[in-house]
Image (tube, rainbow, N blue to C red):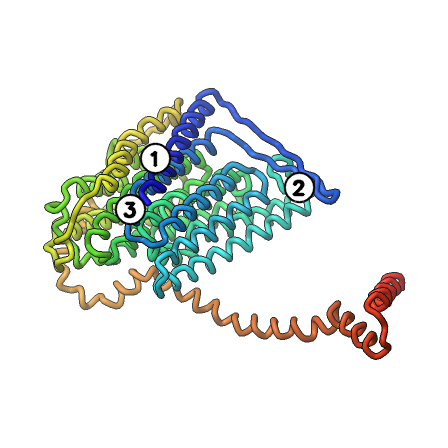
C-alpha cells in the first residue's frame, strides 16, 4: 500500500516542480502558448484548445504539489483503510479533472473537467460509507448540480454564437450577459458562496487528506479561478455588485460561525469559506491578479493546517470535538508549532505568506469608494479571522484534556515530512511570489493610522476573545443565538425549501411518461405495432408504413 502512495506521490511531486518552474519562466519572459486540435466527427468540425500561460501553469504546479504531499501523508493516515487503491485512483482522477478544467479555454472541456470535479468529490466525501458521509455527499452533489446546470446553460448560449471557445467567441451584448450569468452561478456554487454555503462544512465528513486537497485548495477554488480567467464578463455592471455583496456576506457569516463551532475540521472549513469570500470580493472590484495571488498562498497554508489537524484527529481516535481536546502542545510540540504557523499565516501575520496576499487585498479595498456598511463588514470579518484562529489554538493546545483518547498519540515520518515541506512554502512562497507577480509594486499612500489598521484588527481580535472568556458565564442566556450563528444563519433550510418542489417533479414525470409519450413518437410506434398485429404485416412492412406516415406528415 505504501508503495502505491509513495510512487504516485513522487511522480506528481516531480510534475509539480516542472509546472512551477515553467510557470515562473513563462511569467518572467511573458510567454503564452496556444495548442489547437481539430477533430471531424460525422461532418462536424470540433476545435479543441489548450492554453498555457504563467497563471495556469503555476496553479497546476501548486495543485500537483499539494496532491503529492497529501499522497505521502495518506501512507500513514489511510493505512488501515481497506479501499486504499480506490482512494488513490480517485485522487488521481480528481487531479486530472482539475488539469483539464484549468488548461482549456474551451467550454466543452471546462464542462467535462467541472463535472469530473463534482463527481469525484462526491465519491471522496462518501468514502467512509456511513450515514453521515452519505447525507453530506448528497448535500454536496445536489448543491453543486445547481452550478452544473448553470455551466450547461452557458454551453448552450455560447453554442448559439457558433463557438464554444473563448478564444474566438463573438461578443454579443445579450449573449455575453447570459453567459456571464450562467458562469457566475456555476462559480458561486462551486466556491460555496452565500446562499450555497451549506455543503462545504458538511463535506468535512470526508477523510482529512480529502479535506486538505479537495475542500481547501482545489475544488472550492475552481470557481474563483474560473472567475479570474473570465473576469472580462464580470467587470462592472450588475455582476460586480452581486459578487461584492455575496463575497462580503460570506466573509462575515463564515467568520462569525467559526467562532461558535466546536468541530475542528468545520472550523477550518469555515475559515476557508471566509477566505473564498475575500477572493470573490477582490475579483468583483477588478483585482484579479491579487485574488490569484491569495488563491495560491491560501491553498498552501490551509492544506498545511488541515494536515496538522488530521494528525490530532487520527491520534484522538477520530474525535473532532474541540471540547474533548487539549494539551496537544505537551504531546506534540512540532505539530503544535505547525498549526500555530498556519494559523498566523491565515490571520495575515507579518512576513508570512498570508500577509503578502491578504494584507495587499485589504489595503487595496481600503482605497475603494464603498459605503460604510461594506467597510464595517470587511473590518469585522478580518477581526473574526484572528478570533477563531486563537480560539482553535487555545482549545487544542492549552485547555485541559476532557477525555483519554490522546494517550495513544504517536508521530510518524509520513505525517511529519509533508507538513515540514509545506511549512517552508508557507514561510517563503509569499515573499518570493510577491516580487515575481508584481515586479513594479502598486503605489499606495496611506497614513500611519490606515497602515496599522490590519495590525490593530489582530490586536482587537485578541482582546475580543479575552472578553468572551471573561464573560462566558452568560453563555446559557445566548444559546439560541449561538446555535443560529453556528448553523450559518440556518442556510441549510434552503435545501428543505428545495424539497418542496420534488412533488412537482413527480407530477411532471407522470405527465411526461403518459400523455407526452402517448401524443409523440412512442404513441405512433404503438399505433403501428397494433396495426401490424391486426393486419398480420411483417416488421419490415410496418417500418415502411411508419416511414410513409412520417413523410406524409412532413409534407402536409
Q: Residues within 10 Å of mark 2 (few under 14, many from 20)?
A: some
Q: Is residue 529 above or below residue 276?
A: below
Residue at image point 86% right, 77% down: 535
Of discs 1 and 2, which sits in the foreground? 2
Measure the C-alpha gap from mark 1 to mark 3.
20 Å
Quadrant position of the C terminus in the picture: bottom right
Q: Position of residue 152 (x, y in %)?
A: 58, 52
Most foreground residue, 78 or 217 = 78
Q: Which mark is residue 306?
A: 3
Q: Secondary structure at mark 2?
A: loop
Count every numbered label the image shows and give the total.
3
Q: Residues within 10 Å of mark 3 (few under 14, many from 20)?
A: many
Q: Secondary structure at mark 3?
A: helix
Measure the C-alpha gap from mark 3 to mark 2.
41 Å
Q: Which comes sooner in the sequence, label 3 or label 2?
A: 2
Q: Position of residue 76 (x, y in %)?
A: 27, 46
Most foreground residue, 117 or 145 = 117
Q: Position of residue 363 (x, y in %)?
A: 34, 36
Of discs 3 and 2, which sits in the foreground? 3
Q: Secondary structure at mark 1?
A: helix
Instruction: Name the residue carrying label 1.
Output: 357
Residue at image point 30% right, 39% down: 301
Q: Which comes sooner in the sequence, label 1 or label 2?
A: 2
When asked about the image quadrant of residue 282, the answer is: top left
When asked about the image quadrant of residue 541, the answer is: bottom right
Instruction: Name the residue carrying label 2.
Output: 163
Measure the C-alpha gap from mark 1 to mark 2.
36 Å
Q: Residues within 10 Å of mark 1 (few under 14, many from 20)?
A: many
Q: Is residue 478 above or below residue 186?
A: below
Amino acid at each position: 500500500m505504501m508503495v502505491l502512495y509513495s510512487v504516485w506521490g513522487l511522480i506528481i511531486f516531480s510534475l509539480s516542480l516542472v509546472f512551477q518552474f515553467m510557470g515562473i519562466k513563462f511569467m518572467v519572459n511573458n510567454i503564452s502558448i496556444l495548442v489547437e486540435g481539430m477533430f471531424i466527427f460525422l461532418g462536424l468540425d470540433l476545435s479543441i484548445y489548450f492554453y498555457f500561460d504563467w497563471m495556469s501553469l503555476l496553479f497546476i504546479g501548486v495543485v500537483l504539489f499539494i496532491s503529492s504531499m497529501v499522497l505521502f501523508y495518506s501512507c500513514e493516515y489511510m493505512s488501515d483503510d481497506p479501499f486504499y487503491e480506490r482512494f488513490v485512483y480517485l485522487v488521481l482522477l480528481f487531479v486530472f479533472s482539475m488539469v483539464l478544467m484549468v488548461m482549456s479555454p474551451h467550454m466543452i472541456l471546462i464542462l467535462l473537467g467541472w463535472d469530473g470535479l463534482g463527481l469525484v468529490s462526491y465519491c471522496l466525501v462518501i468514502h467512509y460509507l456511513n450515514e453521515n458521509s452519505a447525507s453530506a455527499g448528497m448535500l454536496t452533489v445536489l448543491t453543486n448540480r445547481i452550478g452544473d446546470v448553470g455551466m450547461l446553460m452557458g454551453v448552450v448560449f455560447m453554442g448559439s454564437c457558433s463557438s464554444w471557445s473563448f478564444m474566438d467567441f463573438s461578443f454579443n451584448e445579450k449573449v455575453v450577459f447570459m453567459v456571464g450569468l450562467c458562469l457566475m452561478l456555476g462559480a458561486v456554487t462551486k466556491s460555496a458562496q452565500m446562499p450555497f454555503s451549506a455543503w462545504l462544512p458538511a463535506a468535512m465528513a470526508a477523510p482529512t487528506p480529502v479535506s486538505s486537497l479537495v475542500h481547501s485548495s482545489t475544488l472550492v477554488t475552481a470557481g474563483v479561478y474560473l472567475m479570474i480567467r473570465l473576469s472580462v464578463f464580470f467587470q462592472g455592471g450588475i455582476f460586480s455588485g452581486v459578487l461584492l455583496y455575496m463575497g462580503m456576506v460570506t466573509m462575515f457569516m463564515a467568520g462569525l460561525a467559526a467562532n461558535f463551532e466546536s468541530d475542528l475540521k468545520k472550523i477550518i472549513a469555515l475559515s476557508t469559506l471566509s477566505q473564498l469570500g475575500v477572493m470573490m470580493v477582490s475579483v468583483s472590484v477588478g483585482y484579479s491578479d491579487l485574488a490569484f495571488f491569495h488563491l495560491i498562498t491560501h491553498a498552501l497554508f490551509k492544506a498545511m493546517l488541515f494536515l496538522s489537524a488530521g494528525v490530532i484527529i487520527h491520534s484522538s481516535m477520530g474525535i473532532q470535538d474541540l471540547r474533548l481536546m487539549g494539551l496537544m502542545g505537551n504531546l506534540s510540540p512540532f505539530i503544535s508549532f505547525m498549526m500555530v504557523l498556519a494559523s498566523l499565516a491565515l490571520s495575515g501575520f507579518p512576513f508570512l505568506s498570508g500577509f503578502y496576499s491578504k494584507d495587499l487585498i485589504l489595503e487595496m479595498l481600503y482605497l475603494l469608494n464603498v459605503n460604510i456598511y461594506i467597510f464595517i463588514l470587511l473590518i469585522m470579518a478580518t477581526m473574526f479571522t484572528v478570533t477563531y484562529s486563537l480560539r482553535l489554538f487555545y482549545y487544542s493546545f492549552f485547555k485541559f484534556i476532557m477525555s483519554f483518547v490522546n494517550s495513544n498519540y504517536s508521530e510518524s515520518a509520513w505525517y511529519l515530512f509533508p507538513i515540514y515541506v509545506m511549512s517552508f512554502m508557507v514561510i517563503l512562497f509569499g515573499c518570493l511570489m510577491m516580487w515575481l507577480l508584481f515586479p513594479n509594486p502598486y503605489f499606495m499612500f496611506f497614513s500611519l493610522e490606515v497602515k496599522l489598521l490590519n495590525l490593530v484588527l489582530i490586536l482587537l481580535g485578541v482582546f475580543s476573545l479575552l472578553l468572551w472568556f471573561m464573560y462566558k458565564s452568560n453563555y446559557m442566556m445566548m444559546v439560541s443565538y449561538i446555535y443560529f450563528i453556528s448553523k450559518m444563519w440556518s442556510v441549510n433550510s434552503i435545501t428543505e425549501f428545495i424539497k418542496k418542489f420534488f412533488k412537482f417533479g413527480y407530477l411532471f414525470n407522470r405527465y411526461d411518461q403518459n400523455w407526452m409519450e402517448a401524443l409523440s413518437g412512442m404513441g405512433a410506434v404503438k399505433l403501428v405495432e397494433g396495426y401490424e398485429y391486426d393486419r398480420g404485416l411483417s416488421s419490415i412492412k410496418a417500418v415502411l408504413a411508419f416511414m410513409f406516415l412520417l413523410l406524409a406528415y412532413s409534407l402536409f
